[in-house]
Amino acid sequence: MKRETFKKLYFFCAVLCLGLAMPALALILSMALPIWAMDQTETPPVLAARDLAPTELLVGPDFTVEDTVPTDGFYGIFTVRGTYGSVQARGVAMLRVRAAEMQALARLEETTRAEAVVGGAKDSAEQTLHAAGQTLRDPAGTVERVPESVGRLFSRLGTKVEKRVEKLAGTGDGSASSDQREGIGKARRSLAQQLGVDPYTDNPLLSAKLDQVARWERVGGLAVSIGTGAASIWAGIASKTLTLVWTMTPEEVRAVNEKRLVSLAPGASAEEIRVFLRNPAFTPTTQTLFVDQLESLPVKRGRDSLVRLAGEMENYDQARFLIAATGLLTAYHERVAPLSSVESRGRLAVGLTSAGLLILAVPVDCLAWSDRLVEFGRRSDLRASRREILITGGATHRTRQELQARGWRLRERFQ
């Protein structure tokens, strides 16, 4: 009898403890759930090309863009297929450049073939024609998805990766003498000017063809006359920028930009300016475009911080991001509200108003709630009483919810 009584008492105590524990457990889970949910990310969407880019950029006489466009949480990864090969365009802004470049590539291919047929090759017209007809198709896996780069700018401050940038294009064959390299570089810049393209393009198809034809011209194997391009991909950029990158050597471009920066950003030291000017993440073209953006920025206070930030960019994508972000801050100042200063927060460019509003410029196509944005949401260096994000494209529904919950106002499709 005593044993039965003990069993009943044990069972009663167990039920009582469980009953008391369950509410406490539920409370703990209810408190932990929001933290857990906050850390959950979404898969960046796969979109139709027409949902991201204007129709005129999706098809042309010498190229087509694949309709299915994966995104990486920041940009659409477009695949551009042309008569003479395929390349990627990371973002709508780069797609605009690639569309013009593919047309320029076709024009250059057709011209070199025609010149070779006429007999432009001194040693062997037949050999030159054969070479002129050769094209690069997806060199080194160009159309494979490129690794993340811009996303690192949104992370917390921490370890920076070593700058690893490809050999600067447009400077000639590294095995040639300095005079030969400059001769090839000059010929390449002249070709780019005739085609209306960037002589320092990172388009592997066009870059390889420019180098090839520039070498032929240098050794007298082929005389190419293309005629001035009808429309430059740099339309709207000051003519002095075009003159710099098309007619000057990289060293001359650097010297001009150094002189401009001393005046534009007097708060930056000579060493900080040199770090930026020698940063391999910037080509002579993008270096000049960044200085142009600083010159256009009506806000003088804090320009030196953007120069220092430019020195920290790790690759071409980050350099282009900073250039576009600086342009967005200028647009906000002129069209929405005046900025009192600009500065860098971590590795992001922000604008500040006299009323304490913080403006973060994010020139991307489609912002998705990725691991990088989860980290971004925890950053303490971007706190302000009011804060806005300028996005050139759009954001997913989840991203809007998460950012608004953290006190950010979003201005989407801000150009």
Image (tube, helix red, strand yellow):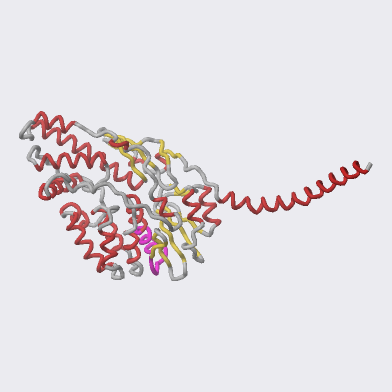
**Where does the image place residue 402, in percent across and percent down from the top left?**
54, 53
**Residue 238's image quarter?**
bottom left
> In which quadrant is the C terminus drawn?
bottom left
**Where does the image place residue 158, in percent across and percent down from the top left?**
43, 57
**Residue 204's image quarter?**
top left
Q: Residue furthest front?
A: 2
Provide the residue span drawn in magenta: 326-342
Along the horizontal axis of the image, is 329 left or right of 133? right
**Image position of 282 with respect to 274: above or below:** above
Q: Nearer the viewer, residue 275 or 82?
A: 275
Along the horizontal axis of the image, is 146 left or right of 62? right
Q: Count all numbered tags in the image, as a single digit.
A: 0
Q: Residue furthest right?
A: 1
Q: Nearer the viewer, residue 56 or 95?
A: 95
> In which quadrant is the N terminus drawn?
top right
**Where does the image place residue 157, in percent across and percent down from the top left?**
43, 58
Q: Nearer the viewer, residue 34 or 397?
A: 34
Which residue is located at x 18 percent, y 42 percent?
211
Which residue is located at x 33 percent, y 56 percent?
323
**Where does the image place residue 183, in percent across and percent down from the top left?**
11, 48
Q: Is 302 inside the magenta-drawn segment?
A: no
Which residue is located at x 39 percent, y 51 percent?
150
Q: Nearer the viewer, residue 382 or 400?
A: 382
